[in-house]
Image: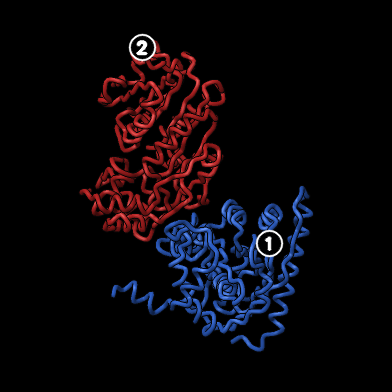
Chain colours: A red, B blue
Amino acid sequence: MTVPKNTQPKPQILITGAAGATAQRVIDRLRETCDLVAVDARIQVPLGDEIPSYCIDFNHRSFEDLFRRYQFDGVIHLGRIRSSQLTRMRRYNANVLGTQKLLDLSHKYGIKRIVVLSTFHVYGAMAYNPALIDESAPMKSAGLSADLIDSVELENLANLYLWRFPELNITILRPCNIVGPSVQNTMGRLLASHRAPVLAGFSPMMQFMHIDDMADAIVLAYNKPVRGIFNVASQDWVAYQRALELSGCKRIPVPSVPPVLPRLILRTLRLQSFPAYLMEFFKYPVVIDGQAFAKEFGFQPKRPLKEIFRFYRDNKRPL
Amino acid sequence: MSLASFLKARLIPAKLDEQINRIRKPIGSLGYDPWGFNNETFKYGFSLTKPIYEKYFRTESHGVEHVPAEGPVLIVGNHSGQLPIDGILVGYAIASREKNPRIPRAMIERFFPTVPWLGNLLNEVGAALGDPVNCARMLANNEAIIVFPEGVRGSGKLYRDRYKLQRFGNGFMHLAMKYNAAIVPVGIVGCEETIPAIANIKPLAKALGVPYAPVAMPLILPAKVHLNFGPPMYFEGGDISEEQVNERVEQVKAEVNRLINKGLTERKGLF
């Protein structure tokens, strides 16, 4: 007896930034139900025979061949280069021009769903920030740090395409700090270290999202084609220095006044896990309101803060 | 025994610990709220304020029961005395009342978050940046908020202008109408005499980036403080002109003035 085949074709999805920890988890969640194609501008990621994986620069002409070869239904764009990586110019090329190319191709080849992963850094850290910033708040970070301009520009582009081409069904996600196993961003490195710098006298409120919860959020967002911009954060908060304490980090105070002093120290030390351009984020809070996303997509993070910090406390590595 | 547990055992008796824990607060799993309020730090703040409220300023509070037990409330008072001692005493009066204590929040000047240690400490005991968005979010959370509509015009005024209410901003009235919040007026008498200032060195204030630089004695005088809370005032929302909003603000101002005069009449001496 033969088992009748399911004739419903699986949706074909292009996932960018495939080498990243978040993308790996999104791929794990979607590989059974979707035909995936993984792309990363840095390395070719081995994902087994079922998932074609490519190392391509979005600005390269051969990138369009992927759209010709595969009939993509959707794109999950997780390939934003973080501000701690590459030079400003290369980041601009990858994040802004590369994203523009991706969106242009998506429009040309009739993509019906796009999820773009942005960051809460676009709001910018400053003393006058209110708490629970919602999605309509201005993106101030471009005026505060030249190193965050490409992140804001990426969002502006996605925004432009969101309204100009509604058929693309673009959803932009602005998550809080994504942390957890194998996360290599600034906050992940800090919490994983034995000793972490703090600005003396400043311990801003922060929000953390476990990487598995973030992957769940991205999959939820992809599966419900609601256009718009959404913060992604849990309804739980903790002060930065308390988070370090709970993660078993020894706090190393950096003099904080006058403001020029810590900037000078950080620029001299060039610590990847405590870069000078993110200094204000360790001084002033950027607390976002994730309720709109939670309500629209039925999202509820499953991993509490205590579990996140327990993981870091039990898995220490040098700074 | 660590220093932290020793201090906790000395400063926070079990009864107080339980009393603070019982008060409803919208906090997360680690005891913080989005504005930085921390339940544990608040207990220390409460414990340290008790002798200041009871012994140093010998505060007399009347009508604190007018603050509703729940729902959004704006506690509107006159601001004075260079430092926010008035806010601390009003907050303690409401948090320590026997029936239905609440932990009121205070809106602070934009200058404070930039000050190391102090900014965070104020946040942890319930203060938040004086931003309309913060105030609106807190009212939506059904919190009680202490507001001084005079702002630095009130706290930085000189001794010769004591108990003369300065111009009230209208922001609090707009928020009260939008969120159906009760306005509880409070007249504060005594704080003007805690740090009497005879002049304000404006160039120095500008150079330091602070709202004012008073010429005053470098100590806080133990003036006796009287707090008179008035009955809650309710203002219906709706689309009304700014002129009508001004009239409502003037009503609240008149009530605060009446409560100040009541306190001034009642007090028998400055100390």
Q: Which residue ends up furthest to the front in the rendered image?
A: A1
Residue type (three-letter) at the residue carrying disc 1: Phe
Q: Looking at the picture, how far across and down is residue A64, in whole percent? A: 38, 13
Chain that bears disc 2: A
Residue at 52% x, 63% y is B127
Residue B214 or A211: which is nearer the viewer?
Answer: A211
Residue type (three-letter) at the residue carrying disc 2: Asp
| Residue located beneath label 1 in the image | B168
Asked if residue A258 is positioned above or below residue A89 in the image, the reply reads below
Asked if residue B14 is positioned above or below residue B155 in the image, the reply reads below
Task: Locate the N terminus of chain B by quadrant.
Answer: bottom left
B13 relative position to A317: left or right:
right
Residue at 28% x, 21% y is A55
Q: Looking at the picture, how far across and down is residue A111, in whole percent? A: 48, 18
Residue B246 or B41: which is nearer the viewer?
Answer: B41
Helix, strand or loop at mark 1: loop
Task: Residue A65: give its label.
Answer: 2
B250 relative position to B210: left or right:
right
Mark 1 → mark 2, Cα distance in angstroms: 66 Å
Residue B141 visible in the picture: yes
Asked if residue B88 is positioned above or below residue A202 in the image, the reply reads below
CB atoms of marks 1 and 2 within 8 Å: no
